[in-house]
Amino acid sequence: MIVVKLGGSLAESGSLVSCLNTIERTWPDGAVIVPGGGAFADQVRLAQRHWRFDDGTAHAMALLAMQQMALLFKGLKPDFSIAGSVAGIQALWAEKKIVIWSPDIGELDKAGIEASWDITSDSLAAWLAGALSADELILVKSAVIDGRSDIGKLAEQDIVDKAFCGFIAQAPFTVKIINHRSL
């Protein structure tokens, strides 16, 4: 099983449709797509700075941002499926579907995912890859990625979130972090 996280910035860079098309061509027998929150998550950050509500509220709103992006992806690719839970993804995967993850807040709360901006869709994609026993996790970014940089360096550069290294420390799956042009 392949889990592909598409950074929210891909929508702003104009490369989102190309990435979705590439996934469809490359893995026609199934892949799991994790959407970043993109501009929707950026609005949550702005609202939290303005209204000063707690990180738990911001976390729930950021997950809703990912759900909005999942709906956008589905609108662009009507043949793809959406699932909110690990069990739902596994059922669709068994049918050889390309699945877009629309994260279930309750499932993530049960898993003990911390409500923090240190944990973004990058770390959530790593958590999902582990929960699904995936073979590979690919993070697709609009940022230029230096192939010689280790993941710790990418975290220092804010290319991946601060918690990502911890989420993949004992990962049984391979991890690739690439620019969208390398997909």
Image (tube, rainbow, N blue to C red):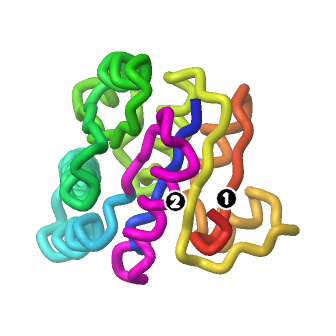
Task: Kindly identify which residue carries mark 2.
Answer: 22
Q: Residue 64: horizontal and vertical position, in percent?
A: 19, 50
Q: Residues within 10 Å of mark 2 (few under 14, many from 20)?
A: some
Viewed as shown, does residue 165 lie left or right of 73? right
Q: Quadrant of residue 82?
A: top left
Q: Which residues are magenta?
A: 11-35
Q: Is residue 94 above or below residue 174?
A: above
Q: Is residue 22 magenta?
A: yes
- Along the line of sight, the residue nearer the viewer: 100 or 177: 100
Q: Residue 159: horizontal and vertical position, in percent?
A: 60, 68
- Along the line of sight, the residue nearer the viewer: 20 or 177: 20
Viewed as shown, does residue 159 lie left or right of 99? right
Instruction: Answer yes or no: is residue 111 visible.
Output: no
Task: Kindly identify which residue carries mark 1.
Answer: 177
- Along the line of sight, the residue nearer the viewer: 75 or 147: 75
Q: Residue 80: horizontal and vertical position, in percent?
A: 30, 43
Q: Quadrant of residue 41?
A: bottom left
Q: Quadrant of residue 92?
A: top left
Amino acid, disc 2: Thr
- Along the line of sight, the residue nearer the viewer: 157 or 37: 37
